[in-house]
Image (tube, rainbow, N blue to C red):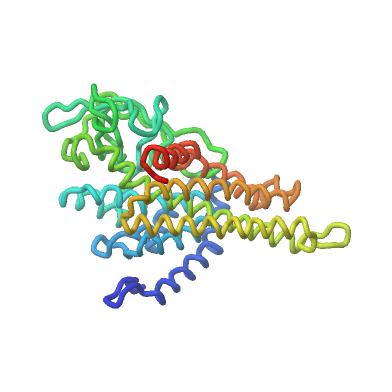
């Protein structure tokens, strides 16, 4: 496929072809992968390779890195499509298309060659490693490092780390021992094979089956100072500005895609299910549910795209809009999937109905990249402490 960027600007024709290609993939091969993932409770390595070979793991990265350089707000149109597939497929696309950006904004030329470009090309896997079992996700990090010469020695715990058992490096956030607050934080690329690092696979989750998550324990694990992104004290800037702000927008769009899938399933079921001589789609109660869902989905989609364009423009309100879009989209997804399952009636509660899987996967979005309460905290802080009117 030719590049989507050309001297005259964004190539809408090539992008339309790519959208059609991904839509066909989601409706076809991805459904077969979904069945296999649900049956085996794991993501086969061959799926990673297929997504890499198709170029789906390098959609937003620069052409110079081996990517397609699709603008972020347009890339989200593809996230919506992938999110209509199995949650683990969406997770792979989302994470790999996001972690390179967090690294690239702070990487030295040497780090770009060692970590960023190999990640884009699918030669290495990088897992975003922030969440801890004994602290909140932010400036109260308890994982700590002590610097001795050209090495940091890392101690502490992490959990809920997506791809944490199969990655090559953890993009990990810790603090300098003895510091408090954001000023003491560091961003490190930690080799998964480092001594003193213990990796344990977490138990199966309710939804997003197949995606591995890890518990990590570090006991004076050595990390070269050369593997630090940005300066000491900039760790949270890498985590929040480099990854979480655009990632929350991307997760918000994944809510839109999953809600769209739930709506399609509900409409199809209502069109064929007959009770008391009428198809469900003819009943006003059902028609109203579907109308409310369609309105909810479109409203969330537009807020997400607005947040994305503001982030692209480096607007001052981008981080706030990121949290707003994530909050709104998650609440929307909860409403839409609940109505979609209700339209299916009792049969929708049983496997292997697709709506059963969608309903389970939807609940996970309320935690990914920060709970609703975290998003409200970010929004309220800007409204009340940032001078917003």
User: Which of the 4 image quarters holds residue 228?
Assistant: top left
In the rendered structure, the answer to whether residue 164 lies left or right of residue 145 reads right
Q: Residue at x 29, y 38 (%)?
A: 236
| Residue 341 screen position, x and y as percent | 69, 49
In the rendered structure, the answer to whether residue 241 lies left or right of residue 74 reads left
| Residue 287 screen position, x and y as percent | 73, 60
Q: Residue at x 43, y 35 (%)?
A: 160
| Residue 89 screen position, x and y as percent | 48, 53
Q: Quadrant of the N terminus?
A: bottom left
Residue in front for this viewpoint, 264 or 381: 381
Residue in front for this viewpoint, 335 or 269: 335
In the rendered structure, the answer to whether residue 193 lies left or right of residue 383 reads left
| Residue 347 screen position, x and y as percent | 74, 49
Which residue is situated farthest in the front direction here? Answer: 389
In the rendered structure, the answer to whether residue 262 lies left or right of residue 177 reads right
**Count of numbered badges drawn on the protein:** 0
């Amino acid at each position: 496929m030719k590049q989507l960027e050309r001297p005259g600007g964004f190539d809408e024709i090539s992008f339309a072809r790519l959208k059609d290609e991904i839509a066909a993939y989601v409706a076809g091969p991805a459904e077969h992968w979904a069945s296999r993932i649900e049956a085996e409770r794991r993501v086969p390595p061959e799926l990673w390779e297929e997504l890499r070979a198709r170029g789906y793991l390098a959609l937003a990265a620069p052409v110079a890195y081996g990517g397609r350089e699709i603008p972020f707000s347009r890339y989200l149109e593809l996230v919506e499509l992938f999110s209509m597939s199995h949650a683990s497929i969406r997770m792979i696309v989302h994470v790999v298309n996001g972690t390179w950006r967090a690294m690239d904004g702070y990487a030295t030329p040497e780090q770009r060659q060692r970590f960023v470009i190999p990640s884009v090309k699918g030669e290495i896997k990088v897992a975003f490693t922030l969440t801890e079992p004994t602290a909140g996700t932010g400036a109260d990090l308890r994982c700590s490092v002590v610097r001795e010469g050209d090495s940091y020695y890392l101690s502490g715990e992490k959990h809920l780390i997506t791809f944490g058992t199969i990655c090559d490096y953890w993009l990990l956030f810790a603090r300098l021992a003895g510091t408090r607050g954001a000023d003491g934080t560091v961003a490190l690329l930690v080799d998964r094979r480092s001594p003193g690092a213990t990796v344990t696979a977490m138990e199966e989750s309710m939804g997003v089956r197949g995606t591995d998550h890890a518990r990590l324990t570090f006991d004076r694990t050595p990390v070269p100072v050369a593997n630090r992104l940005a300066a000491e004290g900039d760790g949270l800037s890498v985590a929040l500005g480099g990854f979480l702000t655009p990632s929350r927008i991307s997760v918000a769009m994944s809510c839109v895609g999953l809600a769209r899938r739930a709506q399609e399933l509900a409409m199809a079921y209502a069109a064929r299910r007959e009770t008391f001589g009428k198809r469900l789609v003819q009943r006003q109660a059902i028609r109203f549910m579907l109308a409310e869902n369609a309105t909810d989905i479109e409203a969330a989609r537009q807020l997400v795209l607005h947040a994305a364009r503001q982030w692209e423009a480096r607007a001052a309100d981008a981080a706030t809009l990121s949290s707003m879009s994530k909050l709104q989209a998650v609440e929307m997804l909860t409403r839409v999937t609940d109505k979609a399952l209700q339209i299916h009636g009792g049969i929708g509660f049983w496997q292997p109905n697709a709506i059963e899987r969608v309903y389970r996967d939807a609940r996970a979005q309320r935690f990914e990249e920060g709970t609703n309460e975290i998003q409200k905290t970010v929004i309220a802080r800007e409204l009340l402490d940032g001078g917003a009117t």
